[in-house]
Amino acid sequence: MDLDDLLRRYFAISDIATLSPDALASGIERCQVDLGLEQDRGKRFALWALLHMLGGAPDLDVSFESEEDRNAARNFMELLEASEGLAP
């Protein structure tokens, strides 16, 4: 899953900064529904990662059945946190 494709699919836009709060909330809700229905591990992770970046991700134990996937999500969160300190 490509980030631009996800943004177009859930928010009908490629620049998320231009979304209204209502459109953002609606897109997050649709993404959360699809996360709950998705069976493919990679796609689930991509949806969860997008939701995490937007502040709408469910807890790891709800999102991922396997410890391996939960650990990958923790690593992702740590990388994002570390990268925030690098931004100019």
Image (spheres, grey):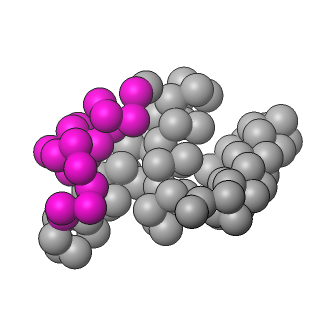
Judge whether residue 79 can be spotted in this image: yes
x 51%, y 58%: residue: 53
Q: Is residue 9 magenta?
A: yes
Q: In which quarter of the image is the C terminus?
A: bottom right
Residue 36 percent location from the top left of the image? 47, 47
Query: In the picture, residue 62 is in which quadrant?
Result: bottom right
The span shown in magenta is 2-19
Q: Which of 78 and 50 is in front in this view?
A: 78
Residue furthest bottom as drawn? 21
Residue in the picture at 43% in, 26% down: 1
Residue 77 shows in this picture? no
Residue 13: % across, % down: 17, 46
Residue plotted at (40% across, 27% down) = 2
Q: Which of 67 and 56 is in front in this view?
A: 56
- Give residue 47's position: percent from left, percent from top: 47, 42
Q: In this view, does 23 lie above or below 9?
A: below
